[in-house]
Image: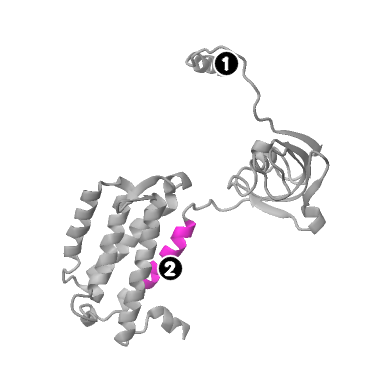
Amino acid sequence: MQLLTLFLTLAQIPEIAGTPTDFLRMRFTEIEVGSGVAAKPGQEFTVHYTGWLTDGKKFDSSRDRDQPLKFIQGRRRVIAGWEAGFEGMKVGGKRRLFIPYQMAYGEQGRGAIPPKAELIFDIELLGAEDVKPAVAAIDLMNPFEAAASKMLDLAKALPEDKLDWRPAPGVRSFREILLHVAYDTKLFLWVASDNPPMDLMMQRFKDQAKKESEPLAKEKVVELLSESFEAVRKVLPTLRPAVLDREMPVFGQPSTMRGIYVIIDTHMAEHLSQLIAYARTNGITPPWSQKQQ
């Protein structure tokens, strides 16, 4: 059945003339087969290594420092030859890797590694541990969560009769700031997902600005704020690096989807600072400050 499936698959591929040419070839010599557990993709590997150039010059060694290296396979924190070089190894195993320059430091080299240098590594797998799946947007989620938590706590702590306080005419009140953040956050999520044309996006922002002055009760304001934060938590942690790096314009300027989430973070941080200043002016101590006292 497998041969038949392979035949049917190949039968759909157009025939071409010529002989395939080897381009990249990763080689290794098994020095010692390990007796521990087999390493799996995505684990954190603990390794000892020594690296040489093909002329015999040693350029690095964790053994000389007596400091094993740890890295998570598949997260591109090491050269491509290392990402592939531990496949099939067991803990305690040793190998010699012969890594072509295309899977090492490329045409330019780096530091003591000259351009187009094939590298030779003796590696020993000391440990392999499971790790939690990576969140590509962790750098965006951390500041978002910090600001969201404080803003929501402060919104809940505001007295109902202070919601319409503003420092001067024409400046947003407590209530308007909170609604502005809630509405803008959802609008930015819409921009990130739909990449709307500039005129439609600007019209939506204008329409929303009118809703910010609605005299909603504090309970409703907190609810809308919470919903906008949950919408970000639902989407952002699921995005892959390639999606975050997708190019798209923002307010007419070249940017990426990641750039939109950066705007969400900075927008929240800006208005959180504004709310804190308002609160202090009115003798309201932010809840997280009370916990530290």
Q: Position of residue 150 (x, y in %)?
A: 39, 72
Q: Nearer the viewer, residue 251 or 70?
A: 251
Q: Which mark is residue 253?
A: none
Q: Is residue 254 left or right of residue 177?
A: right
Q: What amino acid is found at the position of numbered circle 2 in the picture?
A: Ala
Residue named by callout 1: 3
**Spot occupied by residue 133 in the image (x, y as percentages of width and height):** 53, 51
Q: Residue at x 44, y 65 (%)?
A: 143
* Main SS of residues in magenta: helix
Q: At 31% from the left edge and 75% from the top edge, which residue is drawn?
A: 156
Q: Which residues are magenta?
A: 138-151
Task: Tell me the number on the disc at residue 146.
Answer: 2
The colouring scheme, among rainbow, by chain, secondary structure or one colour, is one colour
Foreground disc of the pair 2, 1? 2
Q: Position of residue 264 (x, y in %)?
A: 36, 60
The answer to whether residue 152 shows anywhere in this view is no
Q: Earlier in the sequence, mark 2 or mark 1?
A: 1
Pick the front one: 239 or 219 = 239
Res 9 visible = yes
